[in-house]
Every structure is written in structure tokens, then in C-alpha cells.
């Protein structure tokens, strides 16, 4: 038996192809989960890559007024411009590099639409929406809205200049996120040049996944190839190794997500995610009776 003094680096247990579908008012997404094959990566309920899609003037599509209860929606834009409004009175414009971390908790109604400027001029919409589950004790928490402009997202570059990271949640290369999460979450946006390698520490009690935005990643201890639009799920262990071949045609970009699994029952019904069937029925009733409010500004 081999003796090791360091915690074992994680292996890739599956490489998952995204499914293409239409979401909201009909915008195209790539979705590694939830699908018939993979319902969640606890505590993450959904991963949508929005676009990239080219819209002409007047063509942009978003998600008009709809409710959520029991989890958080996290929106991160790479290009384009979105306008968010919710029934708690929050509103904001998301531009490239900005993050909106919206805790629906006991319930909000919100709209996620291309901004007026974007509608007028058209352009490329490219970004992500991820749903982070809340543990049972926090599902009915008061809604919270964290709107973080690109300039406030900590960034770091490795000593050799080959690894760049934007720290949306968690810690990397000596930088810590400014966003607050209910349970420990890691959300890192890496850009890796050819020849780059990073061994990112990930707490042993986290589940972890990497989604490749661009290029070809070598993931895990076994350096498994993961390509654009694919997601790697990591097995148990400690750190996650991420790299790009020296002779790669260009850089790779990816999101590394991690979090402590809740290990609780998940009952879903569209925009509501609770622990029991009864709680879902209650959520539908509360929404229909107007108890999640409406957007009136
Ligand atoms: Co929504």
C-alpha cells in the first residue's frame, strides 16, 4: 500500500454532456443538470449556461414575472445586459462580470429580462444561472438580494501568470469572496492558459463539479479531457486538479463549483423546491393567493 502524506486529489467520476433546451420566455440554454440522468449535485439543483446567443434589436428574450421558494438563484453574466426586479422591491442591472445572488427563501416573484439598452441595440447574451438549495432550516428565511458589480469580485493570478481566477464564492489563490452564502459554497471562474496547472483546495465534505465554458480542460488526478459544454463531477477527496495541455490551441475557461451537501429530501415543482409534497402544495397555494407578492414598480 502506498503511503501518502497529502490528502488525495479527487478523481472525475463522470463527464456529463449538457442538454440543449429553451427556458423562460424561450431563450436557449445548455443544461448539464437537472436532466433525466442527473437530478442534482447536492446542494446544486440546476446549472444553466444561458447562450451564448446573438439577438438582433428587439429580439432579446428573458424570463418575465415568476415566483421562487426554497432556494437561491445565482446569475453571472459574461456578456449582454439583464434587468432584474423582484417583489421585495429590489432591482438591478447585470452587466458582464456582475453577479446577482438572490435568496428566494420563503418566496419572491421576480423578472429577469434583457435591459432596455440591450433590447434596443441587440448583442450577445452569455451567462449562467445556478440554483443553490437551502437547507430545511433556511427554506422559509427572509428573501435576500446581493448584487455584486464586477469591480467588487476579487480576482487573482498565479505566480507563473497562467491561471486567473474570479472568486465569486469561497477562496482561491489567497483571495476570499465578498458574497455571503447560507451554507459553505465555492464558485470560482478560472481562465487557464496552455500549460497551466492549479491544484485548488476543496474541503473534503464538499461535492464538486467543473463546467467548461471554453476550450479543453484536463480535470482531476487522472487529467481527464473535458470539453466546452461538458461538466465533470468529482468524487470524494480533497483538492481538485485543473490544467490545460501545453500544446492546446488556446486557453480554457471553466466554473468550479463546490458545496456541502444537505442530504435532505428534495421535492421540486417548477420554481419551488422544498422537502415534502405538502410544502410544495403550500407554496403553490401561497403563490396563487398572492402571498409571494408582485412586482409593482
Ligand atoms: Co427566476
Image: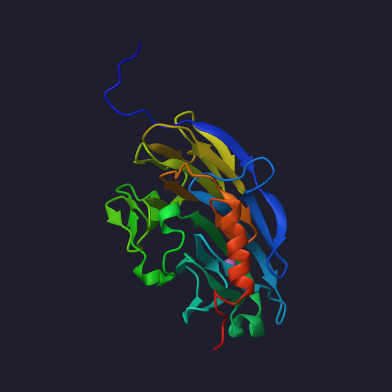
Q: Is residue 253 visible?
A: no
- Residue 280 is situated, as x and y percent measured from the top left of the image, at 60, 58
Q: Is residue 171 left or right of residue 18?
A: left
Q: Residue at x 57, y 40 (%)?
A: 226
Q: Is residue 222 above or below residue 232?
A: above
Residue at point 54%, 48% (across, down): 211
Question: How far across and how far down the image is residue 161, in percent?
Answer: 35, 51
At 44% from the left and 70% from the top, the residue drawn is 143
Give the residue at x 36% y 63%.
179
Image vertical order of residue 8 relative to residue 68, above or below: above
x%, y% of residue 235?
47, 32
Check the image and report above or below for 14 versus 140: above
The x and y percentages for residue 167 are: 37, 57
Q: Nearer the viewer, residue 118 or 133?
A: 133
The answer to whether one can see residue 243 in this image is: yes
Q: The N terminus appears in which quarter of the rendering?
A: top left
Q: Observer-nearest residue: 271 or 276?
A: 276
Amino acid at each position: 500500500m502506498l503511503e501518502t502524506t497529502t490528502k488525495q486529489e479527487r478523481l472525475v467520476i463522470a463527464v456529463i454532456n449538457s442538454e440543449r433546451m429553451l427556458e423562460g420566455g424561450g431563450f436557449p440554454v445548455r443544461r448539464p443538470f437537472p436532466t433525466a440522468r442527473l437530478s442534482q449535485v447536492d446542494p446544486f439543483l440546476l446549472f444553466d449556461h444561458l447562450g451564448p446567443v446573438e439577438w438582433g434589436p428587439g429580439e432579446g428574450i428573458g424570463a418575465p414575472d415568476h415566483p421562487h421558494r426554497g432556494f437561491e438563484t445565482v446569475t453571472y453574466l459574461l456578456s449582454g445586459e439583464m434587468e432584474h426586479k423582484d417583489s421585495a422591491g429590489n432591482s438591478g442591472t447585470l452587466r458582464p462580470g456582475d453577479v446577482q445572488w438572490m435568496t428566494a427563501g420563503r418566496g419572491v416573484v421576480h423578472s429577469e429580462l434583457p435591459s432596455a439598452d440591450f433590447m434596443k441595440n441587440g448583442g450577445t447574451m452569455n451567462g449562467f444561472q445556478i440554483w443553490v438549495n437551502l437547507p430545511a432550516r433556511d427554506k422559509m428565511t427572509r428573501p435576500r438580494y446581493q448584487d455584486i458589480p464586477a469591480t467588487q469580485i476579487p480576482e487573482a493570478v498565479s505566480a507563473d501568470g497562467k491561471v486567473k481566477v474570479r472568486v465569486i464564492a469561497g477562496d482561491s489563490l489567497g483571495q476570499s469572496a465578498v458574497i455571503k452564502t447560507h451554507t459553505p459554497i465555492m464558485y470560482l471562474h478560472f481562465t487557464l492558459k496552455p500549460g497551466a496547472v492549479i491544484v485548488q483546495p476543496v474541503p473534503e465534505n464538499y461535492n464538486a463539479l467543473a463546467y467548461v465554458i471554453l476550450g479543453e480542460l484536463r480535470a482531476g488526478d487522472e487529467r481527464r479531457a473535458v470539453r466546452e459544454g461538458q461538466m465533470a463531477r468529482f468524487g470524494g477527496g480533497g483538492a481538485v486538479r485543473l490544467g490545460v495541455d501545453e500544446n492546446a490551441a488556446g486557453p480554457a475557461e471553466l466554473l468550479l463549483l463546490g458545496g456541502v451537501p444537505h442530504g435532505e429530501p428534495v421535492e421540486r415543482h417548477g420554481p419551488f423546491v422544498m422537502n415534502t409534497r405538502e410544502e410544495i402544495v403550500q407554496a403553490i397555494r401561497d403563490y396563487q393567493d398572492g402571498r409571494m407578492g408582485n412586482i409593482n414598480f
